[in-house]
Image: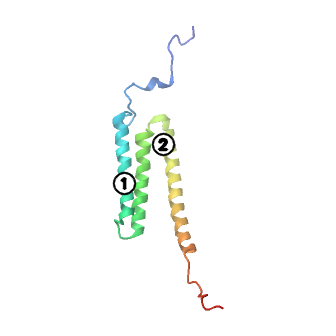
Amino acid sequence: MSAHGDVQHGHDDHHDGHGHDDLGIHATLKGYLTGFVLASVLTIIPFWLVMTGGLEKSSTTAVVVLGLAAVQIIVHMIYFLHMNTKSEGGWNMLALVFTIVLVVITLSGSIWIMYHLNDNMMPGVMPDTSSVP
């Protein structure tokens, strides 16, 4: 017999078995369906904006699409990864900050690359070679 008796302490001792996390979001079918619906809406709106040309300026469309993408990342983190500031002793908050840094680097780098590719790769005035023998 060990010094602790027959009591076993496992990884799941802090769970109450009801499938709730610290934010009150249910890790149940209802919670996953809510996340799925939000993620679907956040995908359909940018798709519709791009396909129909819903906004006149392409730069405004790009900002709206990037904003909705950032919101979708947060939806995934909350509803599917169950991340919040209270669980795991604050390590989830560190993961959230790291995710935000990566998203900012990726989005700003993508915009920078696309802008410069547009400037550098668009054909300029080509010399007229039709009159050369």
Give the quarter of the image for residue 15: top left
Total label count? 2
Report the quarter where the C terminus lies. Answer: bottom right
Residue at figure coordinates x 59%, y 88% from the top left: 128
> Which residue is labeled 1 in the image?
44
Residue 84 in view in this figure: no
Q: Position of residue 33 (x, y in %)?
A: 35, 40
> Which residue is labeled 2 in the image?
93
Residue at figure coordinates x 47%, y 25% from the top left: 12
Q: Position of residue 91 (x, y in %)?
A: 51, 39
Query: Three-letter amino acid code at disc 1?
Result: Ile
Residue 117 in view in this figure: yes
Q: CA distance from mark 1 to mark 2?
A: 29 Å
How busy is the neighbourhood of tag 2: few (under 14 within 10 Å), some, or many (20 plus)?
A: some
- For the residue pair 15 and 55, the one nearer the viewer reads as 55
- For the residue pair 69 and 54, the one nearer the viewer reads as 54
Residue at figure coordinates x 37%, y 49% from the top left: 40
Report the quarter where the N terminus lies. Answer: top right
Query: Three-letter amino acid code at disc 2?
Result: Met
Q: Position of residue 93 (x, y in %)?
A: 48, 42
**Does residue 104 appear left or right of residue 59 in this picture?**
right
Give the quarter of the image for residue 119: bottom right
Of badges 1 and 2, nearer the viewer stands 1
Q: Position of residue 126 (x, y in %)?
A: 58, 83
How busy is the neighbourhood of tag 1: few (under 14 within 10 Å), some, or many (20 plus)?
A: few
Local SS, label 2:
helix
Farthest residue in the top direction?
1
Measured along the vertical axis of the image, is residue 114 above or below residue 82? below
Local SS, label 1:
helix
- For the residue pair 43 and 104, the one nearer the viewer reads as 43
Measured along the vertical axis of the image, is residue 119 above or below residue 12? below
